[in-house]
Image (cartoon, grey):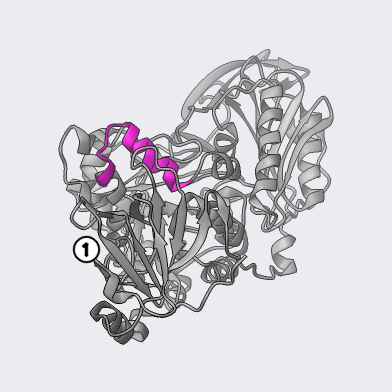
Amino acid sequence: MEKQDKFTTWQESAARLVAVAAGRDPADLVLRNLKLVNVQSREVLDGWQVAVADGRFAYVGPNATHCIGEGTEVVDGAGRYLIPGLCDGHMHIESGMLTPAEFARAVIPHGTTTMFTDPHEIANVMGLEGVRLMHDEALLQPVNIYTQMPSCAPSAPGLETTGYEIGPDDVAEAMTWPGIIGLGEMMNFPGVINADPQMLAEIAATQAAGKTVGGHYASPDRGPAFHAYAAGGPADDHEGTRESDAIDRVRQGMRSMLRLGSAWYDVESQITAVTEKGLDPRNFILCTDDCHSGTLVHDGHMNRVLRHAIDCGCDPLVALQMCTVNTATHFGLERELGSIAPGRRADMILTSDLKALPIEVVFARGQRVAENGDILVECPHLDWPAKARNTVHLGKDLTAQDYEIKAPEGANSAHVNVIGVVENQAPTEALTAELPVVDGLVEGDGDVCQIALVERHRATGGVTNAFVSGFGYTGKMAMASTVAHDSHHMIVVGTDRDNMAKAAMRLAEVGGGVTVFKDGAELALVELPIAGLMSDAPAALVADKAQQMGEAMKACGCTLNNAYMQHSLLALVVIPSLRISDLGLVDVTTFELTSLFVEGDQ
């Protein structure tokens, strides 16, 4: 493994960049015999060459011979395409179950050289201290990891209780940190629409710092509420699922972020705004939002999204712009990264095919960081403190009784509200079901099983019980996870209360993670000791355990694609329609708590 060289700013390197471009000084690196993909002009320039000095492009043109001197490394591109390093415009590192260092180690061989990350998962667990730890480890990496300061912890005040809360003072402080690029997704869209002083103060602090405000408008309403949200300042949005969503956002001056994560397949349904409707592609950005470790190791990262966009009919050069220069421009970094042009960071990829997109050689800041799937550099770790490894506090030993749901007095059956899982999408359905009552307790039936939200931040011993359908579980089983967007308590889903209790206590024992129990025995365990969200183990090891978890879910009857992601979002009380929190069931269409039992049937 090579050690990352010190990286310099443009101001520190300007004189040398000029000298190299003029031929007065030799470059550190020259690449030739290639086809240069210019995302600024959207063209392929056959025979162009590039010269790199101090980790930045100094010369980009037809012939870089004048930049070669003693000590210059010359790389033969073998006729391949040279494209910019790929940028992820919106993502959560914690969703990969990995720390920033291990996440970087996983995605660098896939050609990702820039990430814009929102660590609002750890913010809910550890507050500003957790954000700072993510930010600090991100700055150690050999690629560019920018941090967005989380905006909403809790995501919906009054509807959930988080471990910590984020306020305007926290946002203002974070805006002074070197790696903070803007404000994370503004999930509390009702707060913005209603001009909540705290939400507007956070947005104002970000704009005063000259930085970008991330958006999150998870509602189909395109009336005055949508326009009020746009007026509130969010500059982008990744919650669209339909072509009209993408069109409506860009018409309001937002960038439309099209996501392909482990479970979110929202590119194909929206990219037709460009490929068929002919909208200006400059206002569209590709992103992942949430990718778990198995996807990263086995399928890829932004290269996967780029290939998918091309497969959906997008011109390869247009799709490439959507995950390079468009992203950089959106965050005010067009002069710093996102294209192969003088002065920019020398982040680039050699690939032999613009459609199949094999990632053959990756350079970051002028250094060869990966080749043919192998990483060639170190990704330094922080020494995560003990506080970050001790975050699961249940307050008591849980038993099957904690998961009992008492029926209305004298009832033989119960008419209940049910959370309906929708495959490959973040929204849920608000369903109802008539369930049997046995010995005074409401029981799951068929595809309807129990869900519980177990409080884990303040050791209250609280358990909120409800019902969910769509997973297809059979037999006696339970799955528990301390990844529970966004409050990150503990979500337990199961068909049997004894197994649910065992699964919850197992996670308390190991300090957080995901576990699957069947017939009283543990089938799979992914330990996530850091904040109950991440592991600092190698990505391949975590991915293997995550794969075992997926197989265990299938053994329990689940056939959904990436059902773990669906499981982990069941407490996300800012995306319709029905969710669960530590305070009860939440109707996200009205942003109000609602009863487990259908109104009028209690």
Question: Percent position (x, y) of residue 32?
Answer: 33, 61
The answer to whether residue 118 is above or below residue 429 is: below
Mark 1: amino acid: Pro
Residue 87 visible in rendering: no
Q: Main secondary structure of the magenta part?
A: helix
Residue at horizontal 27 percent and vertical 32 percent from the top: 313
Residue at horizontal 26 percent and vertical 80 percent from the top: 23
Q: Quadrant of residue 125?
A: bottom right
Residue 311 colored in magenta in the image? yes
Question: Percent position (x, y) of residue 491?
Answer: 65, 40
Per the image, label 1 sits on a secondary structure element best described as loop
Image quarter of the N terminus: bottom right
Q: Residues within 10 Å of mark 1 (few under 14, many from 20)?
A: some
Residue at horizontal 59 percent and vertical 22 percent from the top: 559
Badge 1 is on which residue?
62
Considering depth in this image, is 325 or 292 the residue closer to the camera? 325
Residue 444 visible in rendering: yes
Question: Percent position (x, y) of residue 423?
Answer: 49, 27
The answer to whether residue 586 is above or below residue 324 is: above
Residue at horizontal 71 percent and vertical 58 percent from the top: 391
Would residue 14 be found to the left or right of residue 142 on screen?
left
The answer to whether residue 397 is above or below residue 263 is: below
Q: Quadrant of residue 364?
A: bottom left
Q: Quadrant of residue 537?
A: bottom right
Question: Percent position (x, y) of residue 533?
Answer: 64, 52
Would residue 138 be found to the left or right of residue 552 on screen?
left
Image quarter of the C terminus: top right
Considering depth in this image, is 475 or 360 the residue closer to the camera? 360
Considering depth in this image, is 595 or 345 the residue closer to the camera? 345
Q: Identify the magenta region.
A: 301-317
Would residue 566 be found to the left or right of residue 39 on screen?
right
